[in-house]
């Protein structure tokens, strides 16, 4: 099945984001909340999840499952965004106003994924 170009844009966005976990793992480990164990494994598996979900968006058999997975993943990633607001060190040099804007952006990304359940 052929989907609108913006679904493929979203799919590509998640694949690229997942690949970045392997290119810059230290950046992702640095923003992980301290209360979560094994940051290296969490960064690895979240990168794998983003890649798989991005690819799965492109196939009619897996699109809806991928959408549910993306929405769940983005909800879980909210803890990282809130953690980064907790201190300057956790913010990793990102300005506070950008960190605040990232929270509604997460909900926008969730809605964007949810919107494709209609197709």
Image (spheres, rainbow, N blue to C red):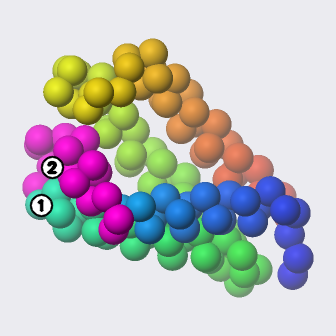
- In percent of the image, x 20 and y 21: which residue is there? 87
The quarter in which the C terminus is drawn is bottom right
The magenta stretch is: 22-37
Q: Position of residue 65 (x, y in %)?
A: 60, 71
Q: Label 1's element? A: loop
Question: Depth check: 18 or 78 in front?
Answer: 18
Q: Which residue is mark 2?
A: 36
- In percent of the image, x 50 and y 71: which residue is there? 51
Q: Is residue 41 above or below residue 2?
A: above
Location of residue 93 (image quadrant):
top left
Location of residue 111 (image quadrant):
top right
Q: Position of residue 57 (x, y in %)?
A: 67, 71
Could you tell whether 99 is left or right of 71 in the image? Answer: left
Q: Which residue is mark 1?
A: 38
Is residue 69 at all visible to an observer of this figure?
no
Q: Label 2's element? A: loop
- In percent of the image, x 12 and y 60: which residue is there? 38
Q: Residues within 10 Å of mark 2 (few under 14, many from 20)?
A: few
């Amino acid at each position: 099945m052929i989907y609108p170009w913006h679904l493929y844009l979203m799919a590509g966005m998640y694949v690229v984001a997942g690949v970045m976990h392997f290119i810059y793992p230290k950046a992702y480990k640095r923003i992980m909340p301290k209360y979560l164990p094994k940051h290296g494994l969490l960064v690895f598996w979240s990168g794998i999840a983003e890649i798989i979900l991005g690819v799965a968006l492109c196939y009619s058999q897996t699109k809806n499952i991928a959408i549910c997975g993306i929405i769940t993943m983005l909800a879980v990633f909210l803890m990282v965004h809130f953690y980064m607001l907790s201190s300057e060190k956790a913010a990793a040099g990102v300005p506070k106003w950008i960190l605040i804007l990232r929270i509604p952006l997460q909900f926008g990304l969730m809605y964007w994924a949810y919107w494709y359940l209609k197709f």
